Image (spheres, grey):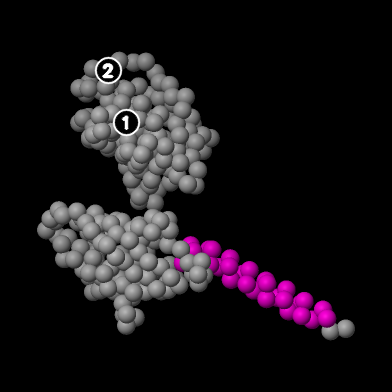
Amino acid sequence: MFKPIPIFITLILALVLSACGSDAAASGGLSGGTQLSMVGTSWQAVQIGELIPPADRPSTIYFEGQAINGNAGCNGYFGTYTLEDEKLSFSDIGSTMMFCEQSMEQESAFLSALAAVTGFRMDDKTMLLLDAEQNVLMSLIPLQHAALVETTWQLTMLNNGQQAVSSLPEGLTITAQFQEDGRVQGSAGCNSYFGEYHHDEGRSLSISALASTEMFCNEPTGVMEQEAAFLKAMEQAQRYEIRQQSLTVYGTDDEVLLQFVTQ
């Protein structure tokens, strides 16, 4: 007569655990014990110690696999991280070596804070990086990124096919718009173009069946050569990456082919 009771209790526990798992998934994978993962998340520092970074010179962290990278305020940096439960540490940090007069104090504070991190905790959607005494070293919020689809992208950099990525000639505008129905279209500089594309959540990208109108333009100088190089690069796409308002398209061996910004 009492045998159904354990089964009922087991069912209640299963429902509770299932609800907890749903909450962990909804929070972006930043809770859940041994299943904890930062991979694919990106963050912007809103406070480093007592310092408030300006919005136009952000310090950022991108978690990719077991590596991190981002901008410290002036220079790009890179390194590795270790994560276990709520223990988090960064190591092997390196960076470029530019000098930015207005950002060096912020950059130094950011990199010093990373080196001292031993853990973290979440406060709603804010991630707090902590030292060994649980003092807050840095507060970060998730970065907001543009969507690939239904965004008008304007080309800023183009691979010339000779292992060099360069900016566009003055006065030349090249655009791309990826539509929900799998079509891509835009201006190649002189002519309008259109074609098909496919992408997935793993950020793979392929572009095919490109065609264009057939006008000839004399200005700006080199427009037709740039147009041909752009269309060729589009057809060589293998994957893409979006960081905030910037889109980078990669080819074979992660060669940078195209860089866009939102228009």
Structural crowding at the residue carrying mark 1, measured as other residues with C-alpha within 10 Å and reported as few (<14), some (14–19) or many (≥20):
many
Q: Position of residue 129 (x, y in %)?
A: 34, 72
Q: In which quarter of the image is the C terminus?
A: top left
Q: Which residue is drawn at 35% across and 64% down?
A: 81
- Tell which of 75 and 142 is nearer to you: 75
- Tell which of 105 and 181 is nearer to you: 105
Q: In which quarter of the image is the N terminus?
A: bottom right
Structural crowding at the residue carrying mark 2, measured as other residues with C-alpha within 10 Å and reported as few (<14), some (14–19) or many (≥20):
few
Instruction: Inspect the image, locate mark 1, and give the three-letter code of the amino acid beneath it.
Output: Ile
Task: Specify which label sits upstream in the sequence, 1 or 2.
Answer: 1
**Residue 189 appears in the picture as rendered:** no
Q: Residue at x 22, y 22 (%)?
A: 222
Q: Quadrant of residue 239?
A: top left
Residue 133 painted magenta: no
**Residue 140 appears in the picture as rendered:** yes
Q: Which residue is drawn at 27% across and 37% down?
A: 156
Q: Position of residue 167 (x, y in %)?
A: 23, 35
The answer to whether residue 216 is above or below residue 235 is above
CB-based contact (under 8 Å), mark 1 and mark 2: no
Residue 217, labelled with which disc? 2
Residue 261, labelled with which disc? none
Q: Where is residue 145 in the image (x, y as percent from the top left)?
A: 39, 51
Residue 16 painted magenta: yes
Query: Mostly what secondary structure, the magenta segment?
Result: helix
- Give the magenta-colored segment's residue range: 3-30
Apparent side of residue 153 relative to residue 97 in the rendered image (left or right): right
Label 1 SS: loop
Residue 174, labelled with which disc? 1
The answer to whether residue 3 is above or below residue 77 is below
Q: Which residue is drawn at 35% across and 41% down?
A: 254
Instruction: Inspect the image, locate mark 2, and give the three-letter code of the amino acid beneath it.
Output: Cys
Measure how far apart labels 1 and 2 are at the Cα level: 14 Å
